[in-house]
Amino acid sequence: MTSDPGTATGGVEARLERLRDAAKTKPVVTAESAWAWIAELAKRAKSDSTAAAAECNALFRLGVPPTGLDGPTDGILVMTTTNPAADAAVRAVTGLWMPWQGKRFHSDDGTGDNRMTRSSKVVSKLLWPLYSMRDAVDGKLAFDFKTYVEAGKDDPDRQVMVIDYADVESNPRLAIRSVRDELVELVDGVYLGKILYKTGSDNYSNIGYFALRTQG
């Protein structure tokens, strides 16, 4: 039986509000609970992608633009939302090898980059032979971005943190500069993002969800 979208959204809102209330006294425990919720959605996406995507969207719309997000974060790809065949292929590949580890933010100047595994350099050279990743203690750094807050492209009635790759000249034109990530904070230290892909002059398609959490 299919649940009513309004009822499902109400359940998401109530659950998030409980977490936010608990965060006032138990921020670390609450952050772990929020992260477990997102991991639960990633797992559900394998068997019921429609319901998982709907819950991700409802959760995203309840988030707020991050403030003071600074330093490295750990990340996971929650799910992609393209078509069943392509999504299954992405799950199969990323289940064996995930080159992306998270993002790093510099709040002072509104910039950042992506944390990648060392092995990602091989694929990068095949796709973007003229692009060079930078060395880091725990892997590689790549695909710089600028951050700012504005209305979402997929959710124009919501304010989001934009993670903008298009405005960085060093980024590869193939694929990377067509991506626009949008990020919201769910509870302190836990963030949910949408992956948008540019399909026209100011048109974007939502192709997936990712999540970040601060380290430490």
Image (spheres, rainbow, N blue to C red):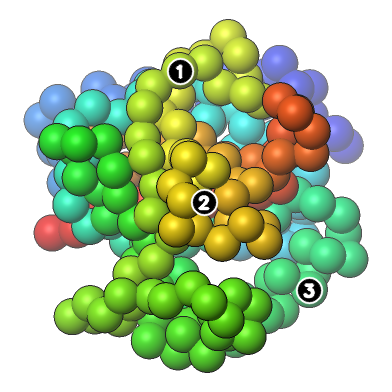
Residue drawn at point x = 46 percent, y = 85 percent:
121
Amino acid type indicated by mark 3: Ala
Q: Is residue 135 left or right of residue 68?
A: right
Position of the N terminus, as image quadrant, is top right
Q: Earlier in the sequence, mark 3 or mark 1?
A: 3
The x, y position of residue 208, in whole percent, is 65, 48
Q: Is residue 112 above or below residue 167?
A: below
- In terms of image quadrants, where is residue 154? top right
Does residue 12 appear left or right of residue 173 in this picture? left
Q: In which quarter of the image is residue 53?
A: top right
Neighbours of disc 3 within 10 Å: few (<14), some (14-19), many (20+): few
What is the x, y in percent for residue 33? Answer: 33, 47
Which residue appears at 69% of the width and 71% of the height? Answer: 91
What residue is pinned by disc 2?
A: 210
Q: Which mark is residue 89?
A: 3
Residue assigned mark 1: 150
